[in-house]
Image: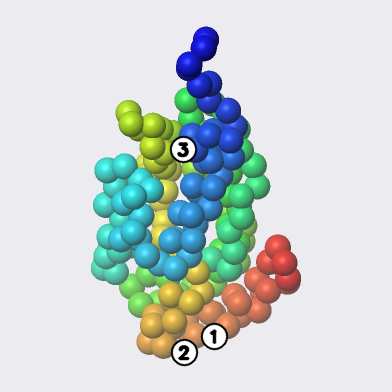
Amino acid sequence: MPGVRQKTPRDETGAHGAEMYVQRFLLVEREGRYESSDRYMSGCDMTYRPELDAIEPRASARIVGSELLGDTVLIRVEYLLLGRYYGGHFGADVHFDTVAFHVSADTTGLPWIDCGRIDAYRWGVEPMAPHVERFDEASRRAWETALQEAAPLMPDG
């Protein structure tokens, strides 16, 4: 129809745009800046509460696929996780986990991520530094072991 632009995979709400959008969220997430995630997620309270919330520190995260499902783009992200930090203690558990982010457009056409699909804080290694400084000896040993185990599994390492 003349004058009406059709959506393409290069639109912000198309597959390419959704991947770029999730990539930006992954950067905010890696840096542990969840207070900045409100612009990526609609209606989510992503405030980190140490007494309630666990962190699954990640060595890496990468987009491994996308799929268009009606008006939603499913973006698959593979995380290389180091373990779990909760209540001042860290337990090593190096493993891969794949999460599907559902990216849709709001009524104005702007993209957002369905926060119901996010079940853990997945900070990178750097923002964990203040926590690592306070680790007990067992947590520190577990942290060092996890970093060593993860190194050869990283996509570029």
- Residue 141 - label: 1
Q: Which residue is mark 2?
A: 137
| Image location of residue 27, percent across then percent down | 49, 61
Q: Secondary structure at mark 3?
A: strand
- Name the residue at 61% across, 50% down: 63
- Name the residue at 52% across, 10% down: 1
In the shown orientation, is residue 19 left or right of residue 111?
right
- Residue 103 - label: 3
Q: Secondary structure at mark 2?
A: helix
Camera-side mark, 1 or 3: 3
In the shown orientation, is residue 117 left or right of residue 43?
right
Camera-side mark, 3 or 2: 3
Q: Earlier in the sequence, mark 1 or mark 3?
A: 3
**Crowding near pointer 1: few (<14 within 10 Å), some, many (20+)?**
some
Amino acid at dot 3? Val
In the shown orientation, is residue 4 left or right of residue 76?
left
Colour mode of the rendering = rainbow
Q: Secondary structure at mark 1?
A: helix
